[in-house]
Amino acid sequence: MKPYIIISGLNFRDNNRGTAALSYGSLSFLNERELLSKETKILNFRFVKNLFKSKNRGTNIQKIDIAGVKWECLTVNVFFVEALLFKYLHVCLPFTNLGRMIKQVEYVAAINGGDGFSDIYNTTSFLNRLPDINLAMKFNIPVIILPQTLGPFRESKNKAIADRILCYASQIFVRDNKYASDLEAMGLKYEQTRDLSYYMKPEPFNIEIKANAIGINISGLAYSNKFRTLSGQFSTYPYLINKLIVYFQQKNIAIYLIPHSYNYQKVEVANDDLEAARDVYSKLHDKSNIILIDQDLISPQIKFIISQMKFFIGTRMHANFAAMYTGVPLFGLAYSYKFQGAFEANGIYDSTAMINDISEKEADAIVERIVTKYKSLD
């Protein structure tokens, strides 16, 4: 086996702990499938314009401990001119780090954000995920499509690009059957498995969790009600969250407010769960039995907290996955049709509710559904 692999989209410190969970899960998944050796190093090429900055020179080495296995991740800085030479003239300089190391890559494994192998967001977002795959195809390096949702595609030219990549791929893993008919029509073999975050193990750490507690993930996206094209759809969301807290608080049940997408140093505007949770907490007249998780935690640690809950109510998809994959009963507050499909794909029914453009009366009905499910646990 060659010494290096590239995992496209690898980011252990993404603000969205769900996206970061895909990175942790990708290594565990590849290791479980015996597609890694203990000596394998994870390689990332970073194209830079200014080589005079110290951070843009040499190679950055990071060691990641995942479930007791330590992996070495190398970020190699490459002058952007090399990328231009390769892209437009198909010239690769053999004496540079890029030229030498690319020949020692065993395969490129693509995460694509879990659902980014699609132009549903826009064409630019789709194409921006493909540089490592394009590099692999030009150097005849195998490509592994890691478990993810494929498609849909609005534009035929983007679907043509995607299908060309899929035909090239040596292995294709999916987490649902959304693109199954297309793959079968092309005569391509694929395997359906769980979302990559399933393979990320919870990481216990020094925290005391009260017994029989309930976890609530408050989405900064919904709470701010100012996020891009979804702006203005969640005016009732703060009311819904407050009603949930008050109900369980009156039952003398410990409630953990658990952020899942946030930047601890610099708030992510209109999309920060911790900012939202802090605001909710600060406005509570009675803070008894309310625990705000206000720490800069990594994905496996947050998954551990969620795994200790008796019941979980989540708005972020991967916060719900953390509960789902650790056997915690849950209810999803959904702003996308994908929630119901993801829940049902894992055998969980009648446990989601859409929160877009709802009235206070509809919010009350959602609270009643959640309470009914919680009571059914006893």
Image: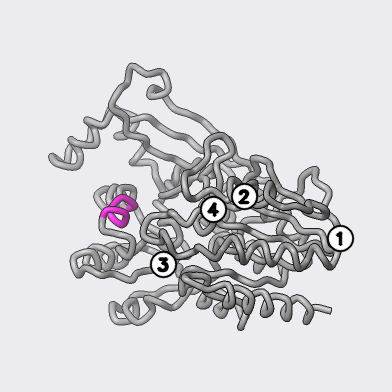
> On the picture, is 115 further left or further right than 207?
left
* CA distance for labels 2 and 4: 17 Å
Magenta stretch: helix, strand or loop mostly? helix
Q: Nearer the viewer, mark 2 or mark 4?
A: 4
* Dot 3: element: strand
Colour mapping: one colour
Mark 3 or mark 1, earlier in chain: 3
Q: Magenta residues, as a range?
A: 124-129
Q: Nearer the viewer, residue 168 or 315?
A: 315
Please name the residue shown 41% across and 65% down the image: 171
* CA distance for labels 4 and 1: 27 Å
Q: Which residue is mark 3?
A: 172
| Quadrant in the picture for residue 324 | bottom right
Q: Are marks 3 and 4 in contact (CB under 8 Å)?
A: no
Label disc, if present, on residue 299 of the rendered structure: 2
Please name the residue shown 31% across and 57% down the image: 126
Q: Residues within 10 Å of mark 4 (few under 14, many from 20)?
A: many
Amino acid type of the residue that numbered disc 1 sits on in the rendered structure: Ala
Q: Residues within 10 Å of mark 2 (few under 14, many from 20)?
A: many
Amino acid type of the residue that numbered disc 4 sits on in the rendered structure: Gly
Q: Are marks 3 and 2 in contact (CB under 8 Å)?
A: no
| Quadrant in the picture for residue 71 | top right
Q: Nearer the viewer, residue 63 or 361?
A: 361
* CA distance for labels 3 and 2: 25 Å
Point out residue 378 in the picture as x, y percentages from the top left corner: 84, 79
Q: Are marks 4 and 1 in contact (CB under 8 Å)?
A: no
Label disc, if present, on residue 220 of the rendered structure: 4
Q: Is residue 307 above or below residue 14?
A: below
Q: Is residue 368 above or below residue 76?
A: below
Q: Which residue is mark 1?
A: 211
> On the picture, is 134 further left or further right than 174?
left
